[in-house]
Image (cartoon, coloured by chain):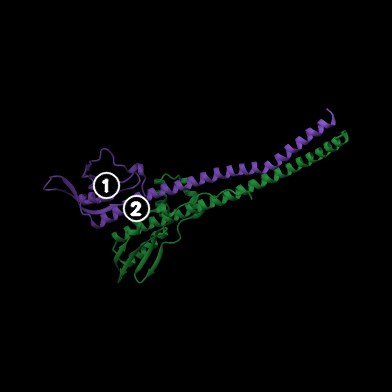
Chain colours: A purple, B green
Amino acid sequence: MNIKNIAIVLTVLLVAIAAMLLMQKGNYVDQATEHYNKTTQNTFKATSKIVEYVGNSIDVNKMVWALACEGIQTAKSSQDMAKLEAKYFPATKGSNSKVKMTRHFEASTFYFIDSKFDKVDTDKKTDVWFLNNLSSIDVSALLGLVTPAATAPSEEEEEYEE
Amino acid sequence: MDNKKFKILAIVDAVIIVALIVLMMVLKGNYNDQAQASVKEQVGAFQESANGVLQELWKSVDQNGMAWKLVYATITGDKTEKSFNAAVKAIEGDQAARFKQLSYVFTAAGIPPKVQNDINEKGGLADKFLLKDEGGVKEVACGKNCSISFTFAKGKLKATDYKALVELNMASNFKLEAPAEFHFE
């Protein structure tokens, strides 16, 4: 190869290296941007999901609290409680236990209340029994004092759906 | 061009090529450091704002739980101002019970205990509960942008207004801004 060819090859190489040098920064910017977008999007999604899920949890929690607060102030019988349940949770019904004289209302496996009554009465018109004289409402689940799985009513329990 | 000129051109090319390669190696290290520092700083800033939202949410749910507990204790208690004041102190002072109640809400939302502990360790529980106590009117915090009131006259409960608790939309108070565009600095 004569000197002319060498000079031409070197000139081409010089142009190529100069071009690579100019593109070098762009490559780092692209890589950094990609890493930044990926990391921050993951954080953004995870945080937004936590906010959304906790918001949903609070939405159920507050309605069960509202039910318990209104129930303890205004309800006397399991029928009254059933009406309040329908007001706050139209799609969910509670169940009575004649033996325990309690009414269990479960909005979700985590959020439920148990209303305690003093006696069992019978409706003279319909001849259906109901619980009367509400004495207290157990809000342990709303205070985080229970383990959800352990509190589901057992199948042996006597239940009556109103 | 004669051979002599080509020779000079080849030598100049070779010198510039070596210089450019050296420059490229130096810049490579600089760009790498710059990119890492920029990413670390900007990702850190975004994570900090995300953590801030979660810590504020945590405190808010804490206040919310305390407020409901206070409402229930007040309406089922003897309805005296003395009992109310004692209940406020007892509820606010029992940090273990507060953690349990608020953690339960997060667990019900499917948030793992590790994440909960992390938020709690960084931000802690709410530091405000009783917001106002003037002339028998007590205002209590029930979360971000949420307060409820109890009115007492001659030491007896006259009115309880906890409508804000029932109407609260917790999630709407906590919106994390989408990450800003990356700047290579």
Percent of width and height locating residue B88 = 38, 62
Q: Label 2, on which residue? A: A62
> Which amino acid, by three-letter code, is at mark 2?
Lys
Q: Chain of mark 2?
A: A
Q: Chain of mark 1?
A: A
Q: For residue A161, what is the image quadrant?
A: top left
* Numbered marks: total: 2
Percent of width and height locating residue B178 = 50, 49
User: Which quarter of the image is occupied by the C terminus of chain A?
Assistant: top left
Q: Secondary structure at mark 1?
A: loop
Q: Label 1, on which residue? A: A90
Mark 2 or 1: in front is 1
Picture residue at 29% right of the left edge, 53% below the top:
A68
Q: For residue A12, what is the image quadrant?
A: top right
Q: Which one is nearer the viewer's eye here, B46 or B126?
A: B46
Percent of width and height locating residue A142 = 35, 51
